[in-house]
Image (cartoon, rainbow, N blue to C red):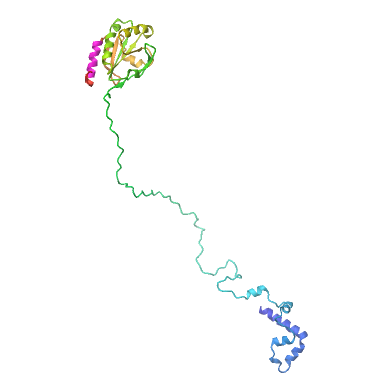
């Protein structure tokens, strides 16, 4: 700014030299030394405050010059200050070059939730009560231990469930052509009628295919209350092995475990069966 003023003054003097020589001579006269520059310029007809005059000689200051010399308040930043330079003291910037941002491991929270306030964890929990089961008076009865499916004399399909649940079972193997078998049928029928509520009776006919009609007559004449099935039917091989004596009639008493009680009864009558049945029932609760 000062440089521009000096140049302006020189130009003014130059103009003065051309148009104001008289003023300069006047300055050189006695007493002229007391005149100021403003007086000399005024005498020459020059107004240094005239913007048009200053602009003509390039003496009018630019906007940038005014900004350079304009004082700023302390709280404002200087726009002339180069970017990237911050003289304000402060904390150092963090350095992320060595430690990644996600370096902190995430630890799962395995802590169980706290129990409610009204919970008492130390208080013993009583198990649910189980109702007492009263044993059935007929708990000693059971189903026939040998499963089978066979046809009876009247064409009905019967199984081991057809015999009901009993304490003991008597199985009788016979044929229609055996006189001893036919003669013992009435005694066997009477025995079944007497012990039928505790003992199950099963009649197995060996000549079922040829003697069915005769067997119907024989059992009906004796009022037999038991079932007669085909001894050679399916699913009876295990049961036939218990009766395999080579003779008829052959009978066996079968207990709850499926085993024969005593020996095979070959050619025996109703009185022998009764004695064995009584012995077994007496040992298990007495006769009816």
Quadrant, the N terminus: bottom right
Quadrant, the C terminus: top left
Residue with the most extreme bottom position: 30
Residue 103 versus residue 210 in the image, above or below: below
> Which contiguous range is marked in magenta?
270-281
The residue closer to the viewer here, 199 or 102, is 199
As for residue 276 lying within the magenta part, the answer is yes
Residue 28 versus residue 190 in the image, above or below: below
Give the x, y percent position of residue 217.
Answer: 34, 7
Tell me where residue 127 sits by quadrant: top left
Residue 40 versus residue 259 in the image, above or below: below
Give the x, y percent position of residue 267.
Answer: 27, 8
Give the x, y percent position of residue 114.
Answer: 37, 49
The residue closer to the viewer here, 154 or 209, is 154
Tell me where residue 82 sits by quadrant: bottom right
As for residue 214 lying within the magenta part, the answer is no
Q: Is residue 248 left or right of residue 106?
A: left
Going 71% across and 92% down the picture, which residue do you hit?
Answer: 32
Q: Is residue 274 left or right of residue 214?
A: left
Residue with the most extreme right position: 18
Q: How many marks?
A: 0
Q: Is residue 24 left or right of residue 134?
A: right
Tell me where residue 268 sits by quadrant: top left
Question: Predominant secondary structure in magenta?
Answer: helix
Residue 22 versus residue 64 in the image, above or below: below
């Amino acid at each position: 700014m000062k440089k521009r003023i000096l140049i302006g003054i020189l130009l003014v003097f130059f103009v003065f030299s051309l148009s104001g020589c008289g003023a300069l001579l006047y300055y050189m006269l006695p007493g002229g030394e007391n005149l100021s520059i403003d007086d000399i310029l005024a005498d020459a007809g020059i107004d240094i405050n005239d913007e048009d005059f200053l602009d003509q000689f390039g003496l009018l200051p630019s906007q940038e010059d005014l900004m350079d010399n304009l004082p700023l308040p302390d709280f404002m930043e200087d726009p002339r200050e180069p970017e990237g330079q911050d003289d304000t003291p402060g904390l150092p910037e963090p350095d992320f070059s060595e430690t990644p941002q996600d370096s902190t491991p995430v630890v799962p929270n395995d802590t169980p939730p706290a129990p409610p306030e009204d919970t008492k964890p130390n208080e013993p929990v009583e198990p649910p009560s189980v109702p007492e089961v009263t044993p059935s008076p007929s708990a000693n009865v059971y189903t026939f231990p040998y499963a089978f499916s066979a046809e009876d004399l009247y064409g009905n399909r019967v199984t081991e469930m057809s015999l009901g649940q009993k304490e003991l079972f008597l199985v009788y193997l016979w044929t229609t052509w055996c006189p001893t078998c036919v003669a013992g049928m009435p005694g066997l029928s009477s025995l079944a009628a007497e012990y039928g509520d505790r003992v199950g009776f099963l009649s197995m006919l060996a000549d079922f295919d040829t003697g069915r009609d005769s067997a119907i007559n024989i059992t009906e004449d004796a009022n037999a209350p038991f079932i007669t099935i085909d001894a050679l039917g399916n699913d009876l091989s295990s049961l036939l092995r218990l009766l395999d004596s080579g003779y008829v009639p052959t009978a066996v008493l079968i207990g709850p475990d499926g085993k024969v009680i005593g020996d095979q009864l070959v050619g025996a009558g109703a009185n022998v069966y009764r004695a064995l049945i009584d012995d077994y029932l007496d040992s298990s609760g007495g006769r009816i």
